[in-house]
């Protein structure tokens, strides 16, 4: 016992190397390395989380306002239109903040093996939702031609609800981490 204790005290690196070799021989992977993140990373992550949770009720509000406009035959002149645009603008601002903080932290965490697939899937889904919201803005009904207006509002609604669904699924996916 004294011999073994002296061996461990004299060469702690040898013990770690032999333990790692034994793990590899047993078919196990090496122990994960600690990843250290900066305070800026943590601040961006906090901003990202707060903006994410603030967006969810706005998405619900926007869905209700949009549905009221969709069902209103005079929606191009409705008072809900201004509120719909205001809430949509707030959502856009939060999405810009989330995209900036999320991408920056994704770059900083690129080599972190913990939850790597989950982080990348979340990022791809959110970038897809971002693209969907840009497309929704581009398909927002306008003008006075009511036939085109009805077609535009249907396309707009489909794109918006798809983007909202992808964003919400992505929030819930990453929140489980």
Image (cartoon, rainbow, N blue to C red):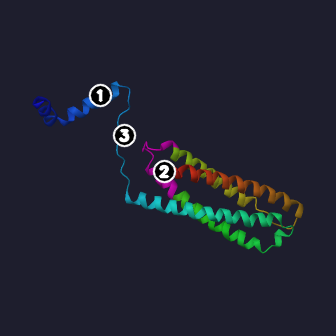
Which residue does the numbered mark 3 point to in the structure image?
Answer: 32
- The local secondary structure at tag 1 comes to helix
Disc 3 crowd rating (10 Å Cα; few below 14, some 14-19, many 20+) is few
Q: Earlier in the sequence, mark 1 or mark 3?
A: 1
Q: Residue at x 85, y 60 (%)?
A: 150
Q: Earlier in the sequence, mark 3 or mark 2?
A: 3
Which residue does the numbered mark 1 point to in the structure image?
Answer: 21
- The local secondary structure at tag 3 comes to loop
Which x, y percent locates residue 6?
11, 33
Question: In the drawing, does residue 7 fall left or right of residue 133?
Answer: left
Disc 1 crowd rating (10 Å Cα; few below 14, some 14-19, many 20+) is some
- Chain part drawn in magenta: 101-117
Numbered circle sitting on residue 106: 2
Q: How many marks?
A: 3
Instruction: Decide which of 8, 118 is in the foreground and name it.
Output: 8
Q: Residue at x 67, y 68 (%)?
A: 87
Q: Is residue 108 above or below residue 66?
A: above
Q: Earlier in the sequence, mark 2 or mark 1?
A: 1
Question: In the drawing, does residue 20 fall left or right of residue 172?
Answer: left
Q: Residue at x 73, y 59 (%)?
A: 138
Mark 1 to mark 3: distance in Å? 15 Å
Q: Residue at x 50, y 58 (%)?
A: 101
Which x, y percent locates residue 15?
22, 32
Q: Is residue 105 magenta?
A: yes
């Amino acid at each position: 016992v004294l011999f073994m204790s002296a061996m461990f005290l004299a060469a702690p690196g040898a013990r770690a190397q032999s333990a790692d070799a034994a793990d590899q021989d047993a078919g196990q992977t090496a122990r994960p390395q600690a990843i250290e993140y900066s305070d800026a990373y943590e601040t961006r992550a906090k901003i990202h989380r707060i903006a994410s949770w603030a967006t969810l009720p706005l998405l619900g509000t926007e869905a209700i306002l949009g549905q009221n406009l969709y069902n209103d035959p005079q929606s191009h002149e409705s008072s809900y239109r201004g509120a719909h645009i205001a809430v949509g603008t707030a959502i856009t601002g939060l999405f810009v903040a989330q995209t900036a903080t999320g991408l920056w932290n994704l770059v900083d965490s690129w080599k972190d093996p913990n939850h790597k697939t989950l982080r990348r899937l979340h990022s791809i889904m959110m970038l897809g939702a971002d693209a969907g919201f840009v497309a929704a803005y581009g398909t927002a009904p306008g003008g006075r031609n009511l036939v085109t207006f009805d077609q535009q509002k249907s396309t707009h609604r489909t794109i918006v609800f798809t983007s909202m669904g992808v964003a919400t699924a992505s929030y819930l996916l990453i929140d489980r981490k």
